[in-house]
Amino acid sequence: MKIHIRQPFFSITTAIIFGIFGLMYGLAAAKGMGVMLGTLSLSVPVSWAISGIMFLMAYFALIHLTD
């Protein structure tokens, strides 16, 4: 297995968008505020989890494993 880095415009743009959303959820969780998604209110631990998932998605938008 090797690490292959993709760098087309779409992958970089997607990573930036996921990173911004991860930062927004992380800052909201750090302030102790829940996040509203429509009529659904998310608690602080759920906001931390979504923040981590967004950063993982940003990472894997740029880098993926290949054989």
Image (spheres, grey):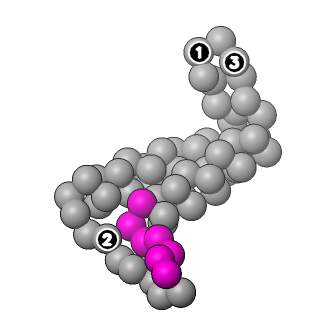
Question: In this picture, is 51 found above or below 39?
Answer: below
Distance of label 1 from label 2 (alpha carbons): 34 Å
Q: Position of residue 41 (x, y in %)?
A: 71, 22
* Residue placed under numbered mark 3 in the picture: 40
Q: In the image, is residue 64 part of the stretch drawn in magenta?
A: yes
* Residue placed under numbered mark 1 in the picture: 38
> Which residue is drawn at the image coordinates 29% and 60% (left, top)?
12
The stretch of residues the image draws in magenta is 61-67
Q: What residue type is labelled 1?
A: Gly
Q: Farthest residue in the front direction?
A: 67
- Confirm or deny contact between disc 1 and disc 3 (CB under 8 A): yes
Q: What residue type is labelled 3?
A: Leu
Circle 2 SS class: loop
User: Is residue 46 among the parts visible in the rendering?
Assistant: yes
Q: Position of residue 35 (x, y in %)?
A: 64, 31
Question: In this picture, is 34 found above or below 46?
Answer: above
* Residue placed under numbered mark 2 in the picture: 6
Q: Which of 47 and 65 is in front in this view?
A: 65
Q: Where is residue 64 in the image (x, y as percent from the top left)?
A: 47, 71
> Which residue is drawn at the image coordinates 60% and 22% (left, top)?
37
